[in-house]
Image: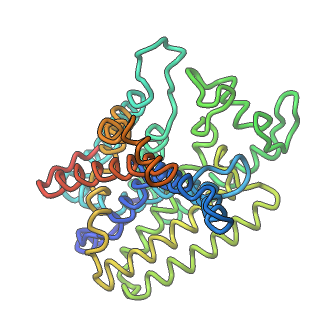
Amino acid sequence: MRYVEVPLALETRRVVSLDALRGFNFVWILGGEGAILALAAVLDNKGPVFEALGDLLRTQITHAEWEGFTFYDLVFPLFIFITGAAIVLSLPRLVEREGRAQAHLRVIRRALLLYGLGIIYYGGISQHWDDIRYVGVLQRIAACYLIASLLFLSVGRRGLIATFAALLGGYWALMTFVPVPGVGAGSFAPDANLANWIDRNYLPGRLWDGMRDPEGLLSTLPAIGTCLLGVFAGLFLQDERVPRERKALWLIGAGFALIAAGTLWSLQFPIIKAIWTSSFVLVAGGWSAILLGVAYHVIDVWGYKGWATVFTWIGANAIVLYFINGVVGFVPFAQRFVGGDLATWFDDTVTEGTGGLIMHLLALTFVVALAGYLYRRKIFLRV
């Protein structure tokens, strides 16, 4: 059993940029997406320039229909990437304080709690057993966190690299060479690929799209690879041999290299978020590394932290805010204040779509208010 040693003195140094980037990431999940789509609606019928801008916003704030990569496709893998980096920052201290065995138990308990929250998030057992969604966003985060953490605690850097290569290469080989009954081998089309076939035939409960699930069984393997990319980034940030001023440049350079590699791989294995292809892992990981590099340099190296305060608040309780949004909903709550005839009045008085934009902005205001309240009172509901 080998353990990736991280100097404790470095590990305890807070990487503020990681919290801020996590918060930036969750802004889009907690209302930012709806606000941008509402803004795009406001830009409709305002001339060719504004209409083109609105179309661009819609394209980038929605998932690619199948193949391709948009800004919104980055949101989920960016969080898994950040989760991997946070593993490096949190587990060494836990090992130092409570020992290796207790660290393993803590990881397992946290993963089970996340998985349970995911079941509840999608309706729990409020309906029949066959209607339960056993996989989902929180469930995939739980699986990635569990496997990446256990690997981090159990193998060295070479073992992590070998596992990463095996996950991406093995997934590519399975998807490319294992024939799908009635279809054959090498198909990556919707409902005609190995990942979708396995989910359709072996995944119990409710599938997100009826015939397939974007957080399915086989595609979780490369998603673990995304988490390991975050682990690699965290290890690099904690490497005392590299000056802090140069770490951002290395992260950004590595990010562009990953994007180039993923784009090249996509010529044979397309970039598809819905089945989390290996090329998607590299491209999404590349953009994640670039964003982390920029945030790290601006916040942790230059010390410009004030502008990221709101993001830090949200990032500190991201999972809790996400769960509240899924079960209760910040937008429905905001609609109680600016919905109905008041929203219609804004549409008639200002321009079409204004009511929806105000509602989503008010929802984001509630998110920030709750996140700030929890942060200022040092209430961190870690799961």
- Judging depth in this view, the residue of 238 and 287 nearest the camera is 287
- The image's colour scheme reads rainbow
Q: Nearer the viewer, residue 47 or 176?
A: 47
Give 93 or 122, whichever is nearer the viewer.
122
Task: Report x, y in % for residue 63.
Answer: 62, 49
Which residue shows up at 66% across the image and 58% down it?
Answer: 69
Residue drawn at x 57%, y 80% as measured from the top left? 253
Residue furthest left in the image:
377
Which residue is drawn at the image coordinates 52% and 60% (left, top)?
159
Image quadrant containing the N terminus? bottom left
Image check: 23 left or right of 366? right
> Does any portion of residue 108 appear in the rendered image?
no
> Is 211 placed above or below 347 here?
above
Q: Quadrant of the C terminus?
A: top left
Let me know if residue 318 appears in the view. Answer: yes
Q: Position of residue 185 (x, y in %)?
A: 86, 40
Residue at position x 31%, y 35% in the image: 336
Left or right of 290? Residue 166 is right
Q: Pinpoint residue 314: horizontal percent, then vertical percent.
A: 30, 56
